[in-house]
């Protein structure tokens, strides 16, 4: 009973943290109006959380060893919960941004340490089952975040997307205070690597800001984007040099000497692009172009989420029976590529039924990638390096998500401009089809009481809106195809991995 309660508690904490990476996406316009801020300033609410998350995740192993896992975990839960409450209380945009940053600092441990707790609760021969259970949180969290945020914002108000964390956080802290113990094998932490922490914070913070804000401010036309790009390159370069030089690094980059970990890290980055970008694109396409409500959009994603849970359980069993992780990863990536191709064919006449099958392909594909990638990542590591290797692997997923969303935003904008130019080039006053379309629109507006001149002007405006909507739809199709191409190009990396022939399957660990 204790094991079940503790497992549900820490998985709930991880899901809560992952939901918060995307729950605010659909509430930005509400926040902007309520706090009297521009939409550009309000988007820092997303950026601040992502920056803090990515800074903390790779050093969670060090902090847990230094502070004690129980103290660090419960302290992080309290920090996350306290700043969630303050986010809802924010009276101006910059107070909200600051609170989101500290909320993200607390949230970093909820993902990484929760996984290590789940693995300890299972015997070694059943740890692929633990991988599957924790994988549910990794997949479901980002998927339901926008839908849950939209539902709460529509039916209550935006502060409640933060207040909802408070009772869950309090419950997690109380249960863990009573039930959570220290790991059986404690890691030794040396002196605090302050320079490593500083260089990581500066380098990753600058990089994350560039990725999150680049498209909004037209990339390198903004001076601060240029400066932050230089800071990111210098900061991360110095970080790598320092961590390889110092005796007790905060992030042990030497574990990347493992070929399997290096390959898994790249593929995890790619899977992060697919996971976060697809869950960003699909709700936007459904709501902005097809007019779906957040609730309808959530129903689109629900069947896929259910299939994903089944896929995770199936994956764990197949790994237990000795199916190579590489085979599972290949199958998952092919399914995601099929999803991308199917979604690229969806047009403005699509209904909800057109989404279900492609989204199920996506869900199963990502689901059967998650656990085997984690297994592959640690397959060449000695036990003492597994926590550091899995923390790095998880950071790559988060960075992949940030990079992916920045990439698809930029690509959507560029492809939309190209398609609009192409469509407008075919619209000429002498074209009978164009003339008939404008005449039909004009007659409609005249029937509604408009004068001849007003009707003509409104008809041209309506035609322009139709062109814009169509060019948007075509750009979404191109972007889905781009995701499929990225997966296809990364697939050959699996040929470079090496699989040890052992009597038992390698135990997977998503994060520690």
Image (cartoon, rainbow, N blue to C red):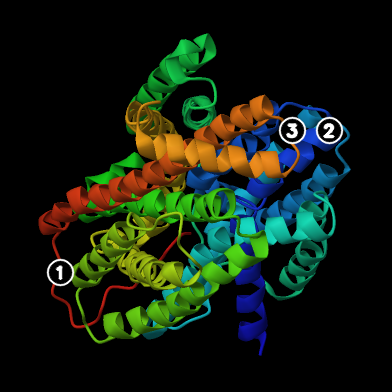
Crowd rating for badge 1 (residues with CA inside 10 Å; few <14, some 14–19, many 20+) = few
Distance of label 3 from label 2 (alpha carbons): 14 Å
In the figure, 234 relative to 479: above or below? above
| Residue 247 image point, x, y percent | 38, 34
Q: Residue 35: give its label.
A: 2
The answer to whether any part of residue 382 appears in the image is no
Mark 1 and mark 2 lie on one chain; the one further toward the N terminus is 2
Q: Nearer the viewer, residue 138 or 457?
A: 457
x%, y% of residue 495?
11, 58
The answer to whether residue 231 is seen in the rendering is yes
Asked which secondary structure carries label 2, the reply is helix
Q: Position of residue 224 (x, y in %)?
A: 53, 13
Residue at point 15%, 69% (across, down): 500
Quarter of the rendering containing residue 149: bottom right
Q: Looking at the image, which residue is at 22% across and 55% down? A: 260
Q: Which residue is mark 1?
A: 500
- The residue positioned 47% from the left and 31% from the top of the image is 211
- Residue identified by numbered label 3: 98
Return the disc, 3 or 2, that comes first in the chain's sequence. Answer: 2
């Amino acid at each position: 009973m204790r094991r079940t309660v503790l497992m549900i508690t820490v998985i709930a904490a991880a899901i809560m943290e992952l939901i918060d990476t995307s729950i605010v996406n659909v509430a930005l316009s509400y926040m902007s109006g309520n706090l009297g801020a521009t939409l550009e300033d309000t988007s820092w609410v997303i950026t601040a959380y992502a920056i803090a998350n990515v800074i903390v995740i790779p050093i969670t192993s060090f902090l847990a060893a230094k502070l004690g896992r129980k103290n660090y975990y419960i302290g992080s839960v309290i920090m996350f919960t306290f700043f969630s409450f303050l986010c809802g209380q924010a009276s101006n945009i910059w107070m909200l941004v600051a609170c989101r940053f500290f909320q993200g600092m607390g949230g970093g441990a909820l993902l990484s340490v929760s996984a290590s707790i789940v693995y300890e609760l299972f015997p070694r021969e059943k740890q692929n089952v633990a991988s599957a259970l924790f994988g549910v949180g990794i997949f479901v969290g980002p998927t339901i975040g926008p839908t849950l945020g939209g539902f709460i914002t529509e039916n209550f108000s935006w502060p409640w997307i933060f207040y909802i964390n408070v009772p869950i956080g309090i419950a997690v802290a109380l249960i863990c205070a009573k039930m959570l113990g220290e790991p059986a094998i404690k890691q030794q932490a040396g002196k605090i690597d302050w320079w490593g922490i500083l260089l990581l914070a500066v380098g990753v913070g600058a990089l994350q800001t560039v990725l999150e804000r680049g498209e909004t401010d037209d990339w390198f036309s903004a001076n601060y984007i240029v400066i932050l790009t230089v800071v990111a390159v210098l900061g991360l370069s110095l970080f790598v040099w320092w961590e390889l030089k110092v005796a007790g690094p905060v992030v042990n980059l030497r574990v990347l000497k493992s070929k399997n970990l290096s390959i898994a890290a790249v593929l995890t980055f790619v899977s992060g692009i697919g996971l976060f970008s697809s869950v960003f694109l699909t709700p936007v396409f459904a709501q902005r172009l097809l007019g779906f409500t957040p609730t309808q959009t959530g129903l689109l994603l629900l069947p896929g989420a259910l299939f994903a849970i089944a896929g995770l359980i199936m994956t764990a069993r197949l790994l237990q029976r000795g199916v190579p992780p590489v085979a599972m990863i290949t199958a998952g990536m092919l399914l995601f590529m099929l999803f991308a191709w199917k979604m690229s064919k969806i047009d403005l006449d699509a209904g909800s039924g057109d989404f279900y099958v492609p989204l199920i392909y996506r869900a199963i594909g990502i689901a059967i990638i998650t656990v085997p990638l984690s297994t592959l990542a640690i397959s060449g590591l000695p036990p003492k390096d597994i926590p550091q290797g899995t923390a790095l692997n998880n950071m790559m997923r988060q960075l992949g998500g940030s990079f992916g969303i920045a990439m698809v935003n930029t690509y959507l904008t560029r492809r939309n401009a190209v398609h609009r130019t192409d469509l407008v080039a075919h619209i000429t006053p002498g074209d009978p089809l164009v003339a008939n379309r404008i005449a039909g629109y004009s007659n409609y507006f005249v029937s509604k009481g408009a004068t001849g001149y007003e009707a003509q002007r409104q008809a041209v405006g309506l035609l322009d809106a139709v062109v814009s909507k169509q060019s948007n739809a075509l750009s979404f199709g191109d972007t889905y195809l781009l995701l499929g191409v990225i997966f296809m190009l990364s697939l050959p990396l699996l040929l470079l991995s090496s699989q040890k022939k052992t009597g038992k399957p390698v135990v997977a660990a998503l994060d520690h």
